[in-house]
Image (cartoon, rainbow, N blue to C red):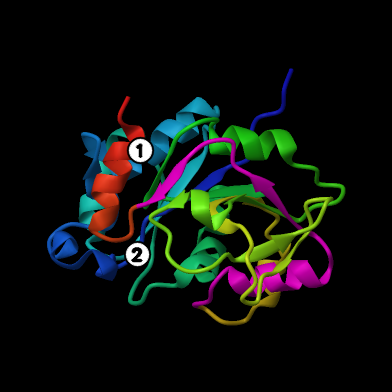
Amino acid sequence: MRPAPPPLMLFAAGLGTRMGALTATRPKPLIEVAGKPLIDHALSLCDGAGITRIVANTHYLPDQIERHLAPRHIPISREEPRILETGGGLKRALPLLDGNPVLTLNTDAVWTGDNPLTQLLTAWDGARMDGLLLLLPPGKATGHTGTGDFLMDATGRLTRAKGAAGPVYLGAQIIRTEGLADIEDEAFSLNLLWDRLIAKGRLHGLMHNGGWCDVGRPEGISLADSLLSP
């Protein structure tokens, strides 16, 4: 019997400020792309990968997201009075996730090709990894602006790009969480944990076998619709 997949954290607490008026009265995860809310696209990936334990964080207009997720009985980690960023949000949610390692998935993107979560689970090797990030070259990361985030060697080990051309992090990963306990800040980015894993040679990358589109800005909606069109 195959072991159950690890729990998954859905990042759904963001303010969505880059969306302008579109998020004045609704949170970004409920903006529709190809006929359904962004968060439902993320949940479809979870279902396709057999993920049964899902936790979502909320902060901006939290009641709307919580009502939307209520039929699925997804536990909520509400961040009040301030948003805790990705690292602080994951650390706050650990008691609800009740597992290690954990998957995390952003809710402001859409995907084509292989299920990104299945890809991560298949490639995960806890003997040599503490983190595995899904990536694409900048030219294939639709809607992404700027340069890449990392450099990847022949074994998949990651270092920081530091302005060099390198792949882009797509917002899907599997990561061990012990290192979060050593970070005293309440609100912090997961970049802080990634840098510590890089220093140990324990952060790895994996190229996504498919397409991806960032839906963090209004123009990302039409790009995502086009990507998902048959």
- Residue at mark 2 to residue at mark 1: CA–CA distance: 24 Å
Closest to the observer: 73 or 1? Answer: 1
Judge whether residue 208 is colored magenta.
yes
Q: Is residue 165 left or right of residue 112?
A: right
Residue 66 shows up from this direction:
no
Identify whether 152 is placed above or below 208: below
Closest to the observer: 169 or 148? Answer: 148
Identify whether 71 is placed above or below 188: above
Closest to the observer: 161 or 206? Answer: 161
Report the span colored magenta: 187-214
| Label 2 or label 1, whichever comes before in sequence order | 2
- Residue located beneath label 2 in the image: 14
User: How busy is the neighbourhood of tag 1: few (under 14 within 10 Å), some, or many (20 plus)?
Assistant: some
SS assignment at label 1: helix
Question: Which residue is at 57% across, 64% downward?
Answer: 148
Identify whether 230 is placed above or below 71: above
Q: Position of residue 147 (x, y in %)?
A: 53, 68
SS assignment at label 2: loop
- Quadrant that contains the C terminus: top left
- Quadrant that contains the N terminus: top right
Closest to the observer: 189 or 227? Answer: 227
Three-letter amino acid code of the residue under disc 2: Gly
Q: Position of residue 7 (x, y in %)?
A: 58, 42
Q: Is residue 184 left or right of residue 222?
A: right
Q: Position of residue 98 (x, y in %)?
A: 60, 48
- Residue located beneath label 1 in the image: 227
Circle nearer the viewer, 2 or 1: 1
